[in-house]
Image (spheres, grey):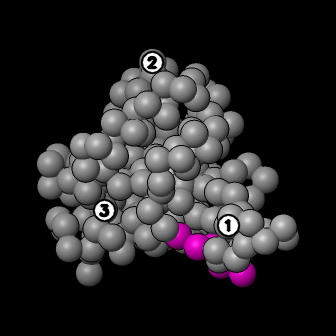
Amino acid sequence: MSPLIEDAKLGDIDSCARIACESEIGKRYGFMRAALAEKMRAGLASGAIIVVAREGAGMPDAGGGAPRGILGFAWIDPRGAFGSAPYLKLIAVDTNKRSGGVGSALLAEFERRTLAIGRVWTLMVSDFNLGAVAFYEKHGYCKAGAIPGFAVDGIAEILMVKKKT
């Protein structure tokens, strides 16, 4: 069953921050949950978009309560790359829910929501994250360059772009 993709609510941000902190990127970069959650809230307040993927396509949990938990999220800056191109600031999927199409659904939502902005989609991937590079290449993204030490000394960020057709 496909995940339900929807706008994050303020109450979702702590879960999103937890997922990011538990990811390889979060561990390597030393993300702190409270600080990341605050940055995400500030991003929302300044025009960023955060979407979440929920399990069960929004079906209630077994107890009939609220929709099931968050599988992953995408943090989108609509004009983040050079002030003119949509930028996927962060995407993270719960470590126990990977390889089930959640990342692909979140990436598709990023592209859908920003289709009318700019000529390309942009994102950066850490040079050690070869699985992510392969994931984005599978979805049509190409390496456009590398920025050594952009986020953390000793790690290059690979700029990837996908031309809109």
Q: Are marks 1 and 3 in contact (CB under 8 Å)?
A: no
Quick check: 76 left or right of 137?
left
Between 122 and 6, which is closer to the camera in this rendering? Answer: 6
For label 2, count other residues whose C-alpha is less than 10 Å away and answer few (under 14), some (14-19) or many (20+). Answer: few
Specify the amino acid type for callout 1: Pro
Q: Which marked residue is nearer to the observer: mark 1 or mark 2? A: 1
Query: Considering only order in the chain, which callout, 3 or 2, is on the residue closer to the N terminus?
Result: 3
Label 3, secondary structure: give it. strand
**Which residue does the image show at 27% across and 73% down from the upper left?**
115
Label 2, secondary structure: give it. loop
**Label annotation for residue 121:** 3
Estimate the spatial distance between the alpha carbons at disc 1 and disc 2, rounded to whole Å: 40 Å
Query: Considering only order in the chain, which callout, 2 or 1, is on the residue closer to the N terminus?
Result: 1
Residue numbers of the magenta segment: 1-5
* Quadrant of the rendering where the C terminus is positioned: bottom left
Is residue 118 shown in magenta?
A: no
Q: Up-down: is 28 above or below 59?
A: above
Pointer 2 residue: 153
Quick check: 37 left or right of 96?
left
**Label annotation for residue 67:** 1
Specify the amino acid type for callout 3: Trp
Rendered location of residue 130, percent (x, y): 60, 48
Residue 109 falls in which quadrant of the image? Answer: bottom left
